[in-house]
Image: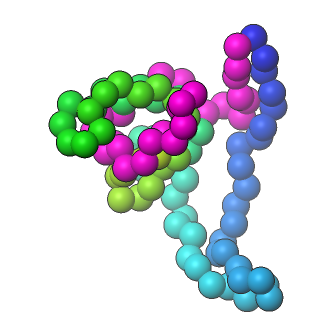
Amino acid sequence: MLITANGHGSRQSCRTDKFGFPSRHVPREKIHFNFQTGDIVKAVVTTGKKVGEYVGKVAIRSSGNFNISTKNGLIQGISQKFCQRIHSKDGYSYAQ
């Protein structure tokens, strides 16, 4: 098993353009719907276009539609109600 230290992220108050001026707002909350970006989740989707079972690292959105990075690629727009947390983000990444 390979373990790599990544940290817990950093605080960024806004995104900037190429000149350094603020251009986009970044939400204050890191946790939405009891999920955090970097958590390992299992999503069992039963309805819609993306029916199936996905396991991977989640990127959260405040809208509730998450992106899941799996071994086979990126799955976009999975609803939070289909997701179940397997492992919370703890500052490390794990691989076999």
Q: x, y (%) of residue 42?
A: 41, 26
Q: Residue farthest to the left? A: 47
Q: Is residue 46 left or right of residue 21?
A: left
Most frequent secondary structure within the magenta stretch: strand
As drawn, 21 above or below 86: below
Q: x, y (%) of residue 92?
A: 73, 29
Q: Quadrant location of residue 34?
A: top left
Image quadrant containing the C terminus: top right
Q: From where the camera sits, is residue 88 visible?
A: no
**Residue in view at x 43 percent, y 48 percent:** 76
**Residue in view at x 77 percent, y 40 percent:** 7
**Residue in view at x 77 percent, y 83 percent:** 18
As drawn, 84 above or below 36: above
Q: Is residue 30 left or right of residue 18?
A: left
**Residue in view at x 41 percent, y 28 percent:** 54
Chain part drawn in magenta? 68-96
As drawn, 60 above or below 63: above
In the image shown, does 3 or 31 lie closer to the viewer?
3
Image quadrant containing the N terminus: top right
